[in-house]
DNA sequence: TATTTCTCTTGCAATATGCAAGCATATGGC
DNA sequence: GCCATATGCTTGCATATTGCAAGAGAAATA
């Protein structure tokens, strides 16, 4: 048995988003892949929140189905797999960062430095461009290492 | 028995957000309260997604605990309850609308009109201000009706 | 006073999650 | 080539969450 998944949760934009990545584990995977340069199954598994293996496999598969992640055999080592963020994933960066700025403001135990929200407010476009460039760098690095 | 809730899901901004409203029903409640002018239990219950009564009560209670919703006896009718969006909720508007624009772009069955994403891209600040004004209007209306 | 509206609560079956173990494929050392 | 290891999953099972139907309690309405 398996996945009915986003069974007709299309149409309404909020519902589409909720059905596509609207659960805590998808959120954290998006964070890891968009902001922390994580790409492999074990990268995600080692995040401090401690996702379990079956849930991780399920969420990666859903995000791949939704064209948010692009699953490829790791060019550096064929026993490994890379999940690359697609353009569709990258286009969530502004909202994701906006949410993080919100958390930084309202979570009294936030660990985010003051400078993060400050930089974003000073120049959001530049801040997002910086994160996009980081993503490019991580992906390029993987393929350049493979050629050696 | 009841709610341990966001047990130490603080610190990391993404994790804080995921723990606070990171599930599909919270998403939809936020949509209803921020964008559709819904305020009462039965308003939320009547949304087309069909949330069940126990889940709705649970999520409203969590969002109230998180200071995202402000629960008050309805000034128009004391047997009813209003859930008003707080400043903390309103501050999610930009990200929520950003996510909706994303869905509008990527959901091939989107029901959102082209004009929505277009207006946002042309002037995001103005678009958000418009939604904020709508929220003010809905809340003011409730209290003005109560005085009659 | 009786009925209806409205916001929940409760009981129970179905589904999803978390955990530990195991499996499959590829790699790397001999 | 052969075996140990690394990596990405799958499976089984206990526990937790959800969904559904019914109903309780407080206030409005007739």
Image (cartoon, coloured by chain):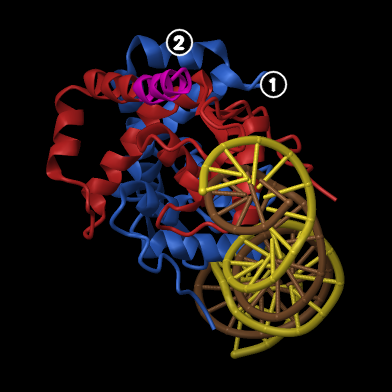
Chain colours: A blue, B red, C brown, D yellow
Q: Between residue B112 and residue B134, name the one nearer to us.
A: B134
Horizontal relation, residue A78 to residue A136: left or right: right
Q: Are marks 2 and 1 on the same chain?
A: yes
Q: How many marks?
A: 2
Among the 4 quarters of the image, the one containing residue B77: top right
Residue A107 image point, x, y percent: 63, 22
The residue identified by callout 2 is A118
Q: Residue at x 47, y 17 (%)?
A: B147
Density class for disc 2 (Cα within 10 Å; few <14, some 14-19, many ≥20) is few
- For the magenta stretch, what is the residue range? B135-148
Q: Is residue A29 visible?
A: no
Check residue B111 for magenta coloring: no
Q: Residue at x 28, y 21 (%)?
A: A125
Q: For mark 2, give the secondary structure.
A: helix
Q: Is residue B114 above or below residue A45?
A: above
Q: Identify the chain of the residue marked 1, using the numbered disc in the image.
A: A
Residue A78 image point, x, y percent: 47, 67
Density class for disc 1 (Cα within 10 Å; few <14, some 14-19, many ≥20) is some
Q: Between residue D27 and residue B107, name the one nearer to us.
A: D27
The residue identified by callout 1 is A109
Q: Between residue C4 and residue A113, name the one nearer to us.
A: C4
Give the main secondary structure, helix, strand or loop, of the magenta stretch: helix
Q: Residue at x 81, y 47 (%)?
A: B2
């Amino acid at each position: 048995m398996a996945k009915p998944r986003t069974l007709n949760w299309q149409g309404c934009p909020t519902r589409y988003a909720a059905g596509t990545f609207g659960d805590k584990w998808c959120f954290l995977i998006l964070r890891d892949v968009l902001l922390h340069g994580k790409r492999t199954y074990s990268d995600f598994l080692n995040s401090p929140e401690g996702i379990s293996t079956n849930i991780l496999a399920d969420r990666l598969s859903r995000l791949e189905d939704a064209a948010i992640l692009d699953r490829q055999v790791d060019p550096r080592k064929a026993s490994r797999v890379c999940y690359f963020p697609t353009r569709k994933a990258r286009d969530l960066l502004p909202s994701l960062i906006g949410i993080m700025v919100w958390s930084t403001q309202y979570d009294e135990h936030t660990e985010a430095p003051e400078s993060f929200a400050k930089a974003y407010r000073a120049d959001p476009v530049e801040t997002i461009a910086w994160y996009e460039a980081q993503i490019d760098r991580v992906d390029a690095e993987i393929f350049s290492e493979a050629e050696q």
